[in-house]
Amino acid sequence: MSDTSTGGLNRRSFLRAAAALGGTSLVGACGGLKGTGGSSSDVLKIGYVSPQTGPLAGFATADNFVVKQIQEALRNGFTAGGVKRRIEIVVKDTQSNANRATEVTRQLINSDKVDLIVGSSTPDTTNPVADQCEANGIPNVTTIAPWEAWFHGRGGKDGEGFTYTTLFFFGMKEFADCFFPMWDRMGVTGKNVAALWPNDTDANAFRQGLGPMMKKSGYTPVDGGAYQNGATDFTAQIAAFKEAEAELFTCAPIPPDFQTFWKQARQQGFRPKLATVAKVMLFPSEAEALGDLTDNIATDFWWSPAHPYASTLDGRSAKQLADDFAAATGKQWTQALGSVYSLFEIAVQAFKEADDPKDRDEVAAKLRGMKIECMSGKLDFTAGPQPGIAIQHPVGGQWRKGERFPWDVVIVDNSANKDVPVGGDLLPTNP
Amino acid sequence: MGWLNAVVQGILLGGLYALFATGLSLMFGVMRIVNLAHGDLAVVASFLALALVGGTGLPLWVVLVVTVPLFALLGYLTQRVLLQRSLAAGPLATLLVTFGLSIVLQNVLLEIFSADTRTLDGGAFATGSFELSGAISVGYLSLTTFVLAGAVLIGIQLFLSRTGLGRMLRASSDDAETARLMGADSRHVYGIATAIAFATVALAGLMFAIRSSFDPSIGPSRLIFAFEAVVIGGLGSLWGTLLGGMVLGITQSLSAQADPALTLLAGHLVFLAVLAFRPQGLLAGRTA
């Protein structure tokens, strides 16, 4: 992609960064007077920030494809504010680094003069991007980060929220709604649930959020302890889980750690009846890496080709989008495909709804009040747990041997979202 | 019983650390090169093996047997073409070269293989184990790794003490100038040392890859364990490296038994304590 900015700090980018630093305060000062900014042409610029390289790059596999689809769907432009508009998308890579995310967002605002910024994948991206947008008065929507991390992590005020920044995803309650029905169906005798939660932002949110919910529903979390990411040995945790005779397992580790843990668990004889994992096994590449041990691991699916959703831009179904992705890239669909697609749907919708799509305050207000039925389903930004947050309801799916690709997802429990058809029975991970 | 299990698993884990640290120890001992690309080289070996498995369809053990000598050759060439040039410019230059190499390798891997998490599928061997007693099960893979680590160290030790090339290597390590006067071609000798180091790091990388998983950016986090094993055991001492690896492994698994939050921290603290109170390491005096 030619407009992707990468590479080190040369003289020019240093000057640009310096200019950006100086420019921030100016824009901030003007922002209070009037919300209109950017260029005055009929081109609407959307900036897109995601981790295309580095450890989080798995989330961005579908980015190039999605950007192309959006450009294709809007080839002939659309009408917003009574004028025919063209769309331009500027893509930036965070290199999986939160500081870099801040820097490229500043570049988008000050050098590229974008009208709206979308971003995706993990709080390391969504939070710095949203912070910059909020400070500079740029309408912004992000996704794929638990809303608690995005909202509380940025110091959001209860019931007030933010002015320019919005998010669609889900949180601890939705994880519970997704996992607990599957646990209930396993008919286990003991109610102990082995929980592998490391000491990081995501896992601590599970410890503080999901733990109490488990107790309320009659399950007892057996916390393996807040170990540090990058561990090479899980003997202690496995011993604790075995001792508690936990038949259910849940976790929120980083992907390489889960691979180590799951192999060691098998080696040392910990075989939970059902594993419902979070944060890992989201992508086919992870399932492939784990080999035969992948069979019937369950996780949360907020998007899949089985979801009965369609594009607002060209009416294409979720299944069609996944098929097109496979045809164009030879790769299997990932959940991020639907989410990233929806980011642009929402952006375009906000432009269309606004009387003046160049008026940042108005576009931001449209984002906050948006109700849309798109590739990610029904999203209502006014009905979330906090203003400006739209909640998705993930369903339970299990990895099974596939036909076209080595591993495929079968939706096995739709208690949390009845719209999604169930594709197969819930099977024990270890019979 | 839990504690005993922790010690057993810790010793086995220590074998992996030691195997991983051997190359680092050897390169430092012989050439005073601190190889910051060590962790990344292990990852490169894993990807090489992955590509060979995918490309040729050969069974994994054949690929392992092929990858290690291939890496030794690569090590020799790297030394002669890349590191030898920087050696003349002083220790800082080699440090920078290996640092640069680390970044280049990471990005080349990312470009070729993408950021996907991969693993070498060892099948039943990777997840199989036998029970020593009710609470202690020893994995075949961990045990093999431990035995390999011991075998590699004994092999290198024999090579250094019994062969002419080995003696030349020790001589160059002690005093390169004088060794050169005696007819030792230090460039060739250094090349051999790097070849051995690369072979061991490849072996360790492959064991790591079967045990857990790898991706292009995971090298540096692995490097830390190798560094700590080397420093705890004593810089440049091969048996010290084995001891250092085991101290690190046992410390980690015992502290995890007490509180998993302490696992890595406890290892780092032991490392720090050794640096502060016994900077020459547990087994001082170089044998390499």
Image: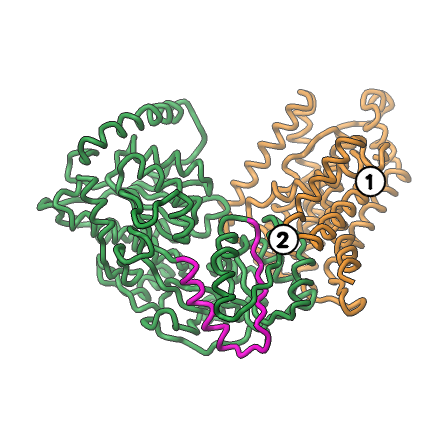
* Apparent side of residue A210 relative to residue A391 in the rendered image (left or right): right
Residue A42 in view, yes or no: yes
Q: Earlier in the sequence, mark 1 or mark 2?
A: 2
Q: Are marks 1 and 2 on the same chain?
A: yes
> Is residue A185 within the magenta segment?
yes
Instruction: Specify whether A164 is left or right of A58.
Output: left
Label 1 element class: helix
Which hue is chain A drawn in?
A: green
Q: x, y (%) of residue A113?
A: 26, 34
Q: Residue at x 29, y 47 (%)?
A: A160
Label 1 and label 2: CA atoms lie apart by 29 Å
Way the structure is coloured: by chain
Q: Which mark is residue B49?
A: 2
Q: In front here: A401 or A275?
A: A275
Q: Colour of chain B?
A: orange
Using the image, determine if residue A289 lies above or below residue B163. below
- Say which amino acid is labelled 2: Ala
First to last magenta residue range: A171-199
- Of residue B60 and residue A364, the one placed in the foreground of this image is A364
Instruction: Give the position of the C terminus of chain A as an image quadrant.
Output: bottom right
User: Which quadrant of the figure has residue A363?
Assistant: top left
Residue at image mark 1:
B240
